C-alpha cells in the first residue's frame, strides 16, 4: 500500500525556522496537504494543494513540493506552534487519502 | 465555512453494534464530501473512507472495507459510521471531516470535534 514518510520529530528554538518533510512516490502527481494537531485538539488544515494557506492561517506557515518530497516550513516558530503535523496526499490510483505518520514539533 | 457536530462518546462491549453521526451545517454543505478518520490512543491519523452525501457514493480505505459502513442522509445533512460487531481494537477517537474529492484524491478542510469510542469487556 502507498505510504508517506515523515520524520517522527523536529525540534527548534523560538524564532527559528522549522522544516518538516514528507516523502512519497506519487507526490510529483498528487498535491500535498498539511494538518496541525495540537495536544487534545482537532486537526486543522494549514496548507492545501502544496502551497496554499487557508484563511486564518498565519503567514509564517508555507508549503512547497519538489519531486517526491513536500515540505512544510514554519518561519519564526512560536511556542504555540508546538503540535503534531501530518502530511496527506493520495496514491496514483484508488488510494484517495493517505496520511503520513506525523511529526511532533517541539519548541525548545 | 462548514461546521461539523459529532455524536457523543460511547462505551461499548465487544460484539456490540454502533452507529455514530456527524451533522453538517453552514455554507454550501451539499457540495462537500464527508470522510471518517480514526485516531487510536497516542497514534496518528488513519483514513477510513469518504462519502458524497448528494448521491451516497462512497470510497473506502481497503484496510477498513468490510469492517465499517459509511452512509449519509442528505435530507438532514448527516453522515454516519457504523460497526456491526465491535472489537476492543476499535477503541479510538473517530473524526468526521468535510472536504473535496477529485478523480484520484481527496482532502479535508473542516473537522468535527471527534467521537471517542471505547470498547471494553
Image: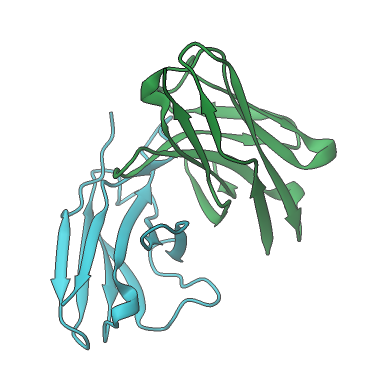
Chain colours: A cyan, B green
Q: Residue at x 72, y 49 (%)?
A: B24
Q: Residue at x 62, y 34 (%)?
A: B51
Q: Nearer the viewer, residue A50 or A79?
A: A79
Q: Position of residue A37 (x, y in %)?
A: 39, 60
**Would you say B74 lies left or right of B114 here?**
right
Q: Position of residue A93 (x, y in %)?
A: 40, 32
Q: Position of residue A32 (x, y in %)?
A: 37, 56
Q: Is residue A67 visible?
A: no
**Residue farthest to the right, as pictured:** B75
Q: Nearer the viewer, residue A32 or B117?
A: B117
- In the displayed structure, would residue A9 be above or below residue B16? below
**Image quadrant occupied by the C terminus of chain A:** bottom left
**Residue farthest to the front, as pictured:** B121
**Image quadrant occupied by the N terminus of chain A:** top left
Q: Residue at x 35, y 83 (%)?
A: A60
Count of numbered badges drawn on the protein:
0
Displayed quadrant of residue B3: bottom right
Q: Position of residue B95 (x, y in %)?
A: 52, 44
**Would you say B95 lies left or right of B73 here?**
left
**Would you say A7 lies left or right of A87 here?**
left
- In the displayed structure, would residue A6 be above or below residue A58? above
Displayed quadrant of residue B102: top right
Q: Residue at x 30, y 68 (%)?
A: A64
Q: Is residue B1 visible?
A: yes
- In the displayed structure, would residue B80 be above or below residue A61? above
Displayed quadrant of residue B119: top left
Amino acid at each position: 500500500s502507498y505510504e508517506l514518510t515523515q520524520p517522527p520529530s523536529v525540534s527548534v528554538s523560538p524564532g527559528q525556522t522549522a522544516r518538516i518533510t514528507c516523502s512519497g512516490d506519487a507526490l510529483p502527481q498528487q498535491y500535498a496537504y498539511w494538518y496541525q494537531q495540537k495536544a487534545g485538539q482537532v486537526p486543522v488544515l494549514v496548507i492545501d494543494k502544496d502551497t496554499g494557506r487557508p484563511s486564518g492561517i498565519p503567514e509564517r506557515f508555507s508549503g512547497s513540493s519538489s519531486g517526491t518530497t513536500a515540505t512544510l516550513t514554519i518561519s519564526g516558530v512560536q511556542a504555540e506552534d508546538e503540535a503534531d503535523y501530518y502530511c496527506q496526499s493520495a496514491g496514483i490510483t484508488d488510494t484517495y487519502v493517505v496520511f503520513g505518520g506525523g511529526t511532533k514539533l517541539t519548541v525548545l | 465555512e462548514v461546521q461539523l457536530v459529532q455524536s457523543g462518546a460511547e462505551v461499548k462491549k465487544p460484539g456490540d453494534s454502533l452507529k455514530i453521526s456527524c451533522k453538517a451545517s453552514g455554507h454550501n454543505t451539499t457540495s462537500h464530501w464527508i470522510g471518517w478518520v480514526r485516531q487510536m490512543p497516542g497514534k496518528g491519523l488513519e483514513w477510513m473512507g469518504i462519502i458524497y452525501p448528494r448521491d451516497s457514493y462512497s470510497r473506502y480505505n481497503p484496510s477498513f472495507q468490510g469492517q465499517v459502513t459509511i452512509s449519509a442522509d442528505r435530507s438532514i445533512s448527516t453522515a454516519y459510521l457504523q460497526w456491526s460487531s465491535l472489537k476492543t481494537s476499535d477503541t479510538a477517537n473517530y473524526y468526521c471531516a468535510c472536504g473535496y474529492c477529485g478523480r484520484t484524491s481527496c482532502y479535508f478542510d473542516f473537522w468535527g470535534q471527534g467521537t471517542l469510542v471505547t470498547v471494553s469487556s
